């Protein structure tokens, strides 16, 4: 994808497992890549609180560029996890809300977010200890 391209890259829609013994996860990898993406997780967490306009999402998430948020909501919409609604007003009013499928993810995503908050200090401590034991490592 070029730096100026904001279109969603066409990807195969077939999510069925290929059946090859060396690829037991090929049917779920694409879905996990999407819902495991940090921006997708944050969008789902925010939309779990109800419909949001684009700028509301961008402010609530913080640190996400307009381009990345656009790509993220387009991908989530393509996957059937959110709905983009355009209201015929001037200027146009657009909001985003979770679909039933997207809403069914919220307890899982919120649990991950809660776990992250609960363990961030111990993870930071572990990283610092590792970095002290392995000076010059390139792991980030």
Image: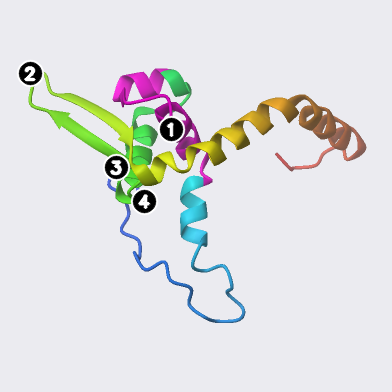
Q: Nearer the viewer's eye, disc 1 or disc 4?
A: 1
Residue 9 falls inside the magenta stretch: no
Residue under numbered circle 4: 1
Work out whether 53 lies above or below 110: above
Q: Main secondary structure of the magenta part?
A: helix
Residue 115 shown left or right of residue 67 in the figure: right
Image: magenta residue range? 36-59
Where does label 3 land, which residue? Answer: 6
Is residue 139 rendered to the left or right of residue 51?
right
Residue 90, which numbered label?
A: 2
Identify which residue is drawn at 8% across, 21% down. 89
Left or right of 60 on screen, residue 124: right
Specify the quadrant that holds the C terminus: top right
Spatial distance from mark 2 to mark 4, Cα to Cα? 33 Å
Residue for badge 1: 43
Residue 132: give x, y in percent of width and height.
89, 32
């Amino acid at each position: 994808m070029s730096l100026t391209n904001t279109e969603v890259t066409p990807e195969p829609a077939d999510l069925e497992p290929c059946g090859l013994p060396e690829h037991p996860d090929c049917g779920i990898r694409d879905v996990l890549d999407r819902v495991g993406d940090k921006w997708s997780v944050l969008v789902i967490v925010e939309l779990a609180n109800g419909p949001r306009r684009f700028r509301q999402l961008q402010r609530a998430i913080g640190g996400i560029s307009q381009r990345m948020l656009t790509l993220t909501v387009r991908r989530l919409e393509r996957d059937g996890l959110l709905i983009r609604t355009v209201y015929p007003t001037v200027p146009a009013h657009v909001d985003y809300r979770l679909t039933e499928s997207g809403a069914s993810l919220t307890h899982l995503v919120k649990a991950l977010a809660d776990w992250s908050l609960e363990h961030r200090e111990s993870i930071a401590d572990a990283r610092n200890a590792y970095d002290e034991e392995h000076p010059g490592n390139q792991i980030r």
